[in-house]
Amino acid sequence: MALRFEILGRFNRARAAQLTLPHFVCQTPLFMPVGTQGTIKGLTADQLEEIGCQIILGNTYHLALRPTSELIDELGGLHKFMNWPRALLTDSGGFQMVSLLHLADITEKGVTFQSPVDGKPMLLTPEESIQIQNKIGADIIMALDDVVKTTITGPRIEEAMHRTLRWIDRCIAAHKRPHDQNLFGIVQGGLDPVLRDICVRGLVDRNLPGYAIGGLAGGEDKDSFWRVVAQCTATLPEDKPRYVMGVGYPLDIVVCSALGADMYDCVYPTRTARFGTAIVPEGVLKLKHKAMAEDTRPIDPTCACMVCKNYTRAYIHSLVSKDAMGSQLLSFHNLYYMMQLSRNLHSSIVQGKFPEFVCNFLQKMFPKGDIPEWVCNAMEVAEIDISSCCAPFRYIQATKVQSNLNEDEIQAV
């Protein structure tokens, strides 16, 4: 395996670790920004290093279409192509089954896409996905899985889970660079704890370098979301990294970290920046709002990023609808926030101060104590006492959550 995963600290289920990859030594928990086609829109590699980015995510489907994996391989791999010295992760292309379903036909052989570039059919098999990712050269590559939305019910969920297990064997057989690249499997099974358990156990039997929890952040309710994460993290190996795919809201990351997850990715911080929204400890700040027009404060007075040190809300307000610089500045700030959140999660766990960090985080976001019930429930299962920042009624309700579960559900979480 081309990685080493060393746990440096724990607090109940939460853990802080050092993840050594071929191109970088990472500290977890960590957030990975999404650079779909080898770039984080509006930011340079130097800026990403400056803010502390450890791993960038690239998209196999889009890179295979343009500029093509063959060209990337000829030019020395994606690290060299995009001038990024730290770690990279490429997804498998499987998520496009959901996001581009109107262009896709899914069979046992693979996924046939209608190319959005020229309209021609493009077959993505497990073998082809791995071959493309081997050429791209990321530190972590993802197995092609059969992805369905968690809001779908019925036999399609079970079919996708079993197909994901059949496809992982084809991915393993096709993987030609196991000493340079780490193949992660993806747990599917929708919101069904029985199917999730079958998938987790099947993947663990393959002894992979790491494991992802897939099929979430797709419209399911938050109570179902955290329960799936809790179930999977409780069953996945202690000595391997756990990656919750598609999660980017700060609150979700804090909850998942409390439940024992290590890695996250999402387009949210940069996409919301392009719509003029900044991420702040209290939640979000909408810079397009008229109230920002004459506000001379920084986005976040507590933030040490270049944007908050040098620019006012009023200045960014004047740019967000008219100039690309506005979205670039907000992208820089938002990603700095996410990297700082990752650092704070890591250090608080190592220092044995994780509950204090969680309470401080929640108090800023919910100063009235109106913390969502799903968060209270999740923290109860994670054994993190948040009573000091939770409204009394909500905390009393949360403490009853496990007594209301049946025996199977208790085992699941």
Image (cartoon, rainbow, N blue to C red):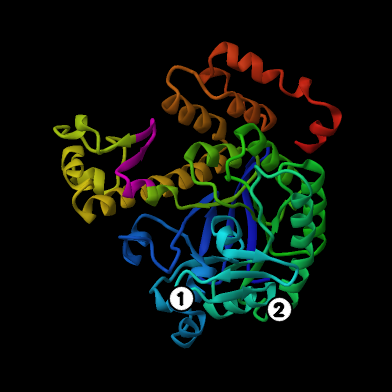
Q: In the displayed structure, does residue 196 sit left or right of residue 184? A: right
Q: Which residues are magenta?
A: 272-284
Q: Is residue 282 magenta?
A: yes
- Give the camera-side residue of 308 and 150: 150
Position of residue 360 measured from the top left corner of the image (x, y, whole percent): 46, 28
Q: In the displayed structure, does residue 324 sit left or right of residue 179? A: left
Which residue is at a point 80% across and 58% down the rendered structure image? 162
Which residue corresponds to mark 1?
118
Which residue is at a point 44% across and 48% down the rendered structure image? 268
Badge 2 crowding class, 10 Å Cα cut-off, few under 14, some 14 to 19, many 20 or more, is some
- Give the camera-side residue of 344 and 310: 310
Kindly give the residue lying farthest to the left in the view shown.
294
- Dot 2: element: helix
Kindly report the distance in space between the C-alpha atoms of the residues bearing marks 2 and 1: 28 Å
Position of residue 151 measured from the top left corner of the image (x, y, whole percent): 65, 42
Q: Residue 53 sits in which quadrant? A: bottom left
Which label lies toward us, 2 or 1?
A: 1
Which residue is at a point 32% across and 35% down the rendered structure image? 285
Q: In the displayed structure, does residue 378 sit left or right of residue 63? A: right
